[in-house]
Amino acid sequence: LKWEGVGILDSRYDTVSVWEQGQEFQKGIVYYLEDKAVVGVLTVNLPDKMDYAKKLVQYALPIDDPKECLNLIYLGGQN
């Protein structure tokens, strides 16, 4: 497994995980949220998605509903 992270990856924050169907715990993303904003992103076996993750953290993307995380970064192919 290849793990890469950006921002604050702290277990005290709320997290939302998104896993590619059929690849649970093999290919996915964990978003770390503070005050309804993305403050950290951990990717698992998705090295080509780190640029997107960095932008989400850089702009502290606001999240009203955790379900919004399901579509922030496309897991297959290019965004």
Image: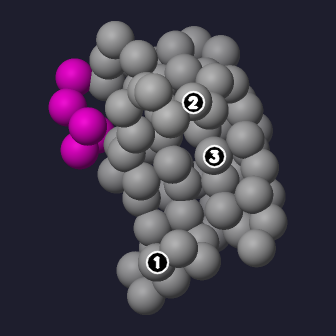
Classified by dominant secondary structure, the portion drawn in magenta counts as: helix
Quadrant assignment for the N terminus = bottom right
Give the numbered dot on residue 10.
2
Q: What is the CA distance from the residue labelled 2 to the residue labelled 3?
A: 11 Å
Give the numbered dot on residue 47.
none
User: What residue did someone put label 3 on?
Assistant: 42
**Type of the residue with mark 3:** Leu
Q: Tag 3's secondary structure?
A: strand
Indicate which disc, 2 or 3, sits on the residue closer to the N terminus.
2
User: What residue did someone put label 1 on?
Assistant: 24
**Type of the residue with mark 2:** Asp
- Residue at image position (54%, 21%) is 39
Circle 1 residues within 10 Å: few <14, some 14–19, many ≥20? few
Residue farthest toward the front in the current orientation of the protein = 12
Q: Is residue 28 magenta?
A: no
Residue farthest toward the bottom in the current orientation of the protein = 22
Q: Which residues are magenta?
A: 64-68
Q: Position of residue 68 (x, y in %)?
A: 28, 40
